[in-house]
Image (cartoon, coloured by chain):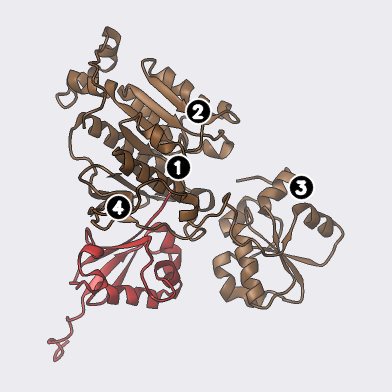
Amino acid sequence: MATTTEIPVTLNKDEILRYSRHLIMPEVGMEGQQKLKAARVLCIGTGGLGSPMALYLAAAGVGTLGLVDFDVVDYTNLQRQIIHFTSDVGRKKLDSAADKLKAINPYLNLRTFDTRLSSANALELFREFDIIADGTDNFPTRYLVNDACVLTGKPNVYGSIFRFEGQASVFATEEGPCYRCLYPEPPPPGLVPSCAEGGVLGILPGLVGVMQATEVIKLILGAGEPLIGRLLLIDALGMKFRELKLRKNPDCPACGTHPTVTKLIDYNEFCGIRGEEKPVGNGVPEIQVEDLKRRLDAKEDLFVLDVREPHEYQICNLGGYLIPLNDLPKRVNELDSSREIVVHCKMGGRSAKAVAFLQQAGFQKVHNLAGGITAWADRVDPKVPKY
Amino acid sequence: MPGHGRISYSIAMSKIHIPTPLRQYVGKQASVDVAGSTVGEAMNALVSEHPELRKHLYTEDGKLRAFVNLYLNDEDIRYLQKEATALKDGDNISIVPSIAGGC
């Protein structure tokens, strides 16, 4: 695809040497490398997908790379977010990423945006770039990126991952479908687990992020067959790749013939999330970790129920009785409703569902441990590992 | 089967591919073989055999959820005859729910 930059770009002697393996391929050549240098690509997020994308795009000679992120590097990121090093923990992801990208390619024009992408800033931001690469991790931002791409006419290079599975496509090109053609509506909150809840194989974002980088490069060069109108499904466990046809839906609310999405909306509301993302199950009785500690120390008769999975129990536990949330309905008879029960999970979300379920089943003395075993590790016993 | 040859092959056997997040509801299988002459029948056979799967795919009034897409081979059934789309032996059905992870 043509970039909007009209000023002819040239490569100096150092750049010619640096990109020589591109330059000797007819599919790239001097013309292609100049297109790469003139191109402006915006990466949303510098996490699992954003890390390999930004690293490869910078190395390949994309001239202007924008990064949007507001987050700070933490230890749990290091298993997959390879742009960040152990020594970066606690630093802004943008600062950490900028160091590596500049070190890889000093010719890179890097533009960093230390902000959360929102309906208020997305259109203005997208207009300054040619291609948007979506490396976000939640449904509201996915729909926001899609709609902003449709409204500004910028291709949306999409990748998404969960556990061992990935999806990749190129949305919102003039002729092709958009994300809403595939999924008109998001799932209700809580039904589809996030990577933080469900886990993700560390290599998978590498695999999918590099596919996204490949699609970005192809769009810039105008070479090959981009993933327009095709959804690539990646199963890393079986190492199987399948391709499904995507059609542009004439009734699509964003890119159809009579679009109803004519400006950006409140995407948290659209995705059923009110205010900050609170764990589901507000309103169930809660107990704080300090209270639980005090009451356990006083040898009060409390039954601690752990509703996480067995492999999580192996990482750390409070000695609670283990019944994974999904098994609770068929194993509820193992519990004594006359005793006071404190239910916990990792963060408090699953245990809130368990408490709501137990209340419906007639249990009256049941509490949710607010913040889960993570809060216990933070505020009661730092020896308990966090994960 | 002697004497039954005329009807015994009338119901197609298809393979339904199960995405990772839903495999916990089908005994961790990556795919399930089911009998059914339409996509709807095959899906019904699947959720009858694995009832816990139903609420993840269908709303309470029995409609396929909006964030779940069904594909017959490489084609979205919304552009075929939806759940009435006919099946033949060896067809592949894919359940493709939306995932958002990226971090």
- Residue placed at 46% from the left, 72% from the top? B52
Q: Which mark is residue A119?
A: 1
Labelled disc at residue A380? 3
Residue nearest the viewer, comparing A310 with A260 = A260
Residue A252 place in picture, x, y as percent: 29, 55
Please give left or right for residue B76 compared with residue A352 in the image.
Answer: left
Image: A9 above or below A261:
above
Q: The N terminus of chain A appears in which quarter of the rendering? A: top left
Q: Which residue is mark 2?
A: A94
A352 to the left or right of A229 = right
The residues tagged by marks 4 and 3 sit, at their Cα atoms, a distance apart of 53 Å
Instruction: Same chain for labels 1 and 2? Say yes or no.
Output: yes
* Cα separation between marks 1 and 4: 18 Å
Q: Which is in the foreground here, disc 1 or disc 2?
A: 1
- Which mark is first along the chain, 2 or 1? 2
Image colour for chain B is red
Q: Chain of mark 1?
A: A
Marks 3, 2 in one chain: yes
Kind of residue at badge 4: Pro
**Residue type of the residue flagged with mark 1:** Ser
Q: Is residue A381 visible?
A: no
Q: Secondary structure at mark 4?
A: loop
Q: Do pointers 1 and 4 mark residues of a single chain? A: yes
Residue, disc 4: A259
Element class at badge 2: helix
Q: Quadrant of residue A41?
A: top left
Q: Earlier in the sequence, mark 3 or mark 2?
A: 2
**Residue A147 pos. (x, y %):** 36, 46
Binning the other alpha carbons within 10 Å of mark 3 as few (below 14), some (14 to 19) or many (20 upward) gives: some
Q: Closest to the observer: A27 or A310? A: A27
